Image: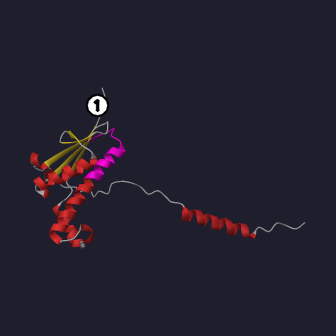
Amino acid sequence: MPGLNTTATADISFMLLVFFLVTTSIDSDKGLSRLLPAIEPEEQREMDISEKNVLRITLDEQDSLRCENESVTPAELQERIVSFMATVEPEKHVLSIQAHQHTSYDAYFAMQNAIVAAYHQLRSDYAKKRFGMPLEQCTPEQRDSALLHYPQRISEEQVKTSDK
């Protein structure tokens, strides 16, 4: 009785494996790109910050976004940050964020996206005014100048529920 020829089975299996590896998309990690500051000695950590240079942003457990105790949408928050930065010295400002521990990730990331968009808008406007071109077309040195002019100065605090 003649045997079954199975030499092509290994080749076909290998080709199917390669096909599925190439066509399958693998989810990448999502997150916020943040560069943490270097650890400074204790005596250098405290700063004197004027109250007029602080913009307070809160996010409560019902995902209600507030800026200076007024309810806002993420788009309105972006506008408020841009207008706030026009009234203070850029290197002396602080965005104070208080997010409740039960805030949803979607609301938190929407708030963070609004903050990043506001900084991008400020830096783009600065680049157009100073260099005559959008931030994306600037040289690395010009981009660094815009980043230094509008540094991200954010103070975050997580509000926890008190257990009784």
**Image spot of residue 30 (x, y percent):** 39, 54
Residue under the image location 27 percent in, 55 percent down = 116
Residue 36 lies in what quarter of the image? bottom left
Q: Is residue 140 left or right of residue 54?
A: right
- Verify whether residue 96 appears in magenta: no
Q: Relative to 38, does residue 111 appear above or below in the rendering?
A: above
Q: Quadrant of residue 60?
A: top left
Magenta: main secondary structure equals helix
User: Which quarter shows the C terminus?
Assistant: top left
Q: Which residues are magenta?
A: 99-114
- Which residue is drawn at the image coordinates 13% and 58% (left, top)? 91
Residue tagged 1: 162
Question: Image check: 118 left or right of 88?
Answer: right
Residue 134 in sight from this viewpoint: yes
Residue that sits furthest to the bottom in the current view: 139
Q: Residue 89: x percent and y percent? A: 10, 56
* 107 or 9: nearer the viewer: 107
Percent x, y for residue 11? 68, 69
| Magenta stretch encompasses residue 104 | yes
Evaluate whether residue 147 shows in this view: no
92 and 39: which one is in front?
92
Compared to residue 103, the image places residue 23 above or below, namely below
Residue 131 x, y percent position in the rendering: 17, 71
Tell me the quadrant of the picture where the N terminus can be found: bottom right
